[in-house]
Image (spheres, rainbow, N blue to C red):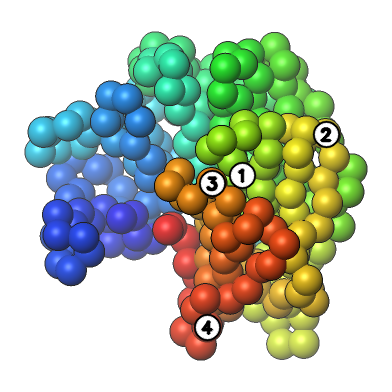
Amino acid sequence: MGTEAAGVFRSEDGGATWVPDSSGLGSLRIWSLVQHPITGVLYAGTEPAALYRKHPGATEWTPCTPFTTLPRYREWTSPNPPRHEPRVRGIGLDPERPQAIAAAIEEGWLVLSLDGGVTWTNLTEGSDFDSHSVLFAPGQPQVLLSTSGDGFYRSDDGGAHFRPSHTGLEGRYLSPLVLHPARPRTLYAYCTRNYPPSWFQPGAGAEGAFFRSDDQGGHWRRIGNTPLIPGGCWTACGDPREPETFCAGLTDGSVWLTRDGGKQVEPILEGLGLVSVVSI
């Protein structure tokens, strides 16, 4: 489990107890944490923007090559006051190519490595500066899918160029993508009409809703039968054991779930107060 200010924690008893697991990390502000499904290697993305890996059986995290070597790194920053350092909002791994790693940088476009994090390329052509997530399309090594603060973006040439695809969305600020484990062209996301500064203002809110695409992001449709939701979304996930499941944690302290592909979307946890669920 990654935390916003206390590093990584590990549980070996199904979540009953947790122990710190942050040795080797250069920052305790964890914004993304994923595991490669084949190799078992863990990757952690931090603020300030950096990527760390941990091999099975290892006791320490080791850093990938710093992003500071990239020519446009000095342009990375956040536009929202108070200005903060860029952070790794999302990590994409390719099950068929263990050395292929992509990362979504808020605010710094996307980065790609094909050698396990030794060298990086900043993917800036057509992608959004405020990137939130990135995925490799299963079975399509040249296709990258990304969400951002300005909608959905897709590349068909390995990240050299991206193009937007917002048809059907009722806003532009998107949560991380969730890929349907059995139908790789089906995607889920949470989209808000308003941007983060308004999420926490009295009388404002995010005005968010859940969306689904069945053509790999070409078109989107709103799912669930709920009014607009006041909470914004930092994180979302699926369950490979239940392919029709999509779960999202919101900034108003609620967690929302669908088990039927979006026909019904409902809160399964409420009343936590003004907290931000940043990882599930």
Q: Secondary structure at mark 2?
A: loop
Residue receiving disc 2: 218
Q: Are marks 2 and 1 in contact (CB under 8 Å)?
A: no
Task: Give the label, 4 or 3, closer to the camera.
Answer: 3
Residue type pointed to by label 4: Glu
Q: CA distance from mark 1 to mark 4?
A: 23 Å
Which residue is label 3 attached to?
Answer: 243
Query: Alpha carbon of mark 3 to alpha carbon of mark 2: how far?
Result: 21 Å
Q: Nearer the viewer, residue 128 or 1?
A: 1
Relative placement, left or right, of 218 versus 13 is: right
**Whether residue 43 is situated above or below residue 221 in the rendered picture:** above
Percent x, y of residue 268: 52, 76
Circle nearer the N terminus (2, 1): 1
Cα separation, mark 4 vs mark 2, equals: 33 Å
Which element carries disc 3, helix, strand or loop?
strand
From the viewer's perspective, tell me whether residue 220 is left or right of residue 269.
right
Look at mark 4 in the image and give the residue it sits on.
270
Indicate the amino acid at tag 2: Gly
Numbered-mark total: 4
Name the residue beneath numbered marker 1. 177
In this rendering, the answer to whether 250 lies above or below 45 is below
Badge 2: few (under 14), some or many (20 or more) residues near its Cα, within 10 Å? some
Question: Which of marks 4 and 1 precedes in the sequence?
Answer: 1
